Amino acid sequence: MLKFTPISILSSNYLWLIEHSRSREVWAVDPGDAAPLLVYLKRANKQLAGILITHTHGDHIGGIDDLLRHHSAPVFGPQHPRIPQLTHALEEGSRFALWPDVEVTTLALPGHLPEHLAYILASASDLHLMVGDVLFSCGCGRIFDGTPELLFQSLMRLRGLPDSTRVYCAHEYTLINSRFALNYEPDNRALQDKYAQAKQLTAAGKCTLPSTIASEKACNPFLRCDVPEFCKSADSVLKIQYQTPLQRFTALRSLRDSFSL
């Protein structure tokens, strides 16, 4: 019934399109660049129903004006001076519908930026999470205007979602993130498999997303900072026995900032 199409934009971003099998209208999530979306809409003979914004970094909002010059559509997102085009201001717990049978609930997830929102789409028995830059496949966002504690709390909220929830991240980072994670939990079989799959998909020029909450709980080091087997392995590699999950998370987040393949 629902189709989620990633459109590659800028250097590593995905602009996600949400389509319904019974509608010619589509919703766009985080349009950092309008041009590829405008081409898609014209070729597919689709109309833009609306825009969902997770946060105010330029690679997520930079295409709004161009889209609105070609399509009259509402803009949903956090209230912020950097989104003057906003028509529907959202906050924690806001509810609305994309289509009559597709309900959306917003989560406020600070840590990357204070205003960051995520969107949970409920359709039939399925849950879909448009998560922006808070959670990545095998990773998490940088701390630009927040604290490690805030970001960690936001990630723990996401970890509590049902395992089957599909996770649509805004960047293609699975390969580098899983390689980073293997440094600290090399014997994790699920992580080994995820890295191998990411290598294969990336080499073929394919998207590695969506992930699932179950996969992230099994593989993502930033969701595993209180899991005994991960703590033992990571602390051994780091040669420090951390006293709290937050301390371990903070150290790993700092190390990830300078990591490259």
Image: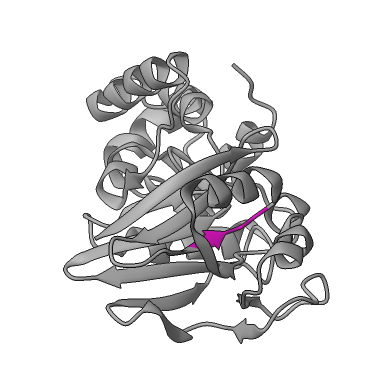
Along the viewing direction, whichever of 221 and 135 lies nearer the viewer: 135
- Residue sitting at x 68%, y 69%: 114
Q: Which residues are magenta?
A: 27-31
Q: Extreme left residue here?
A: 125
Q: Residue at x 35, y 33 (%)?
A: 232
Relative side of 32 to 183, left or right: right
Main SS category, magenta section: strand
Question: Which residue is painted at 30% across and 21% down in the image?
Answer: 192
Identify whether 124 is placed above or below 240. below
Question: Residue 36: which quarter of the image?
Answer: top right
**Residue 190 image-quadrant placement:** top left
Find out whether residue 209 is within the magenta segment: no
Between 61 and 165, the residue placed more toward the observer is 61
92, 229: nearer the viewer: 92
Seen in the picture, residue 198 relative to 207 is either above or below; the reply is: above
Q: Is residue 244 visible?
A: no
Q: What is the quadrant of the N terminus in the image? A: bottom left
Picture coordinates of residue 39, whole percent (x, y):
61, 44
Q: How is the image coloured?
A: one colour
Looking at the picture, tell me which residue is in the foreground, 45 or 131. Answer: 45
Task: Tell me residue 30's x, y (percent).
Answer: 61, 57
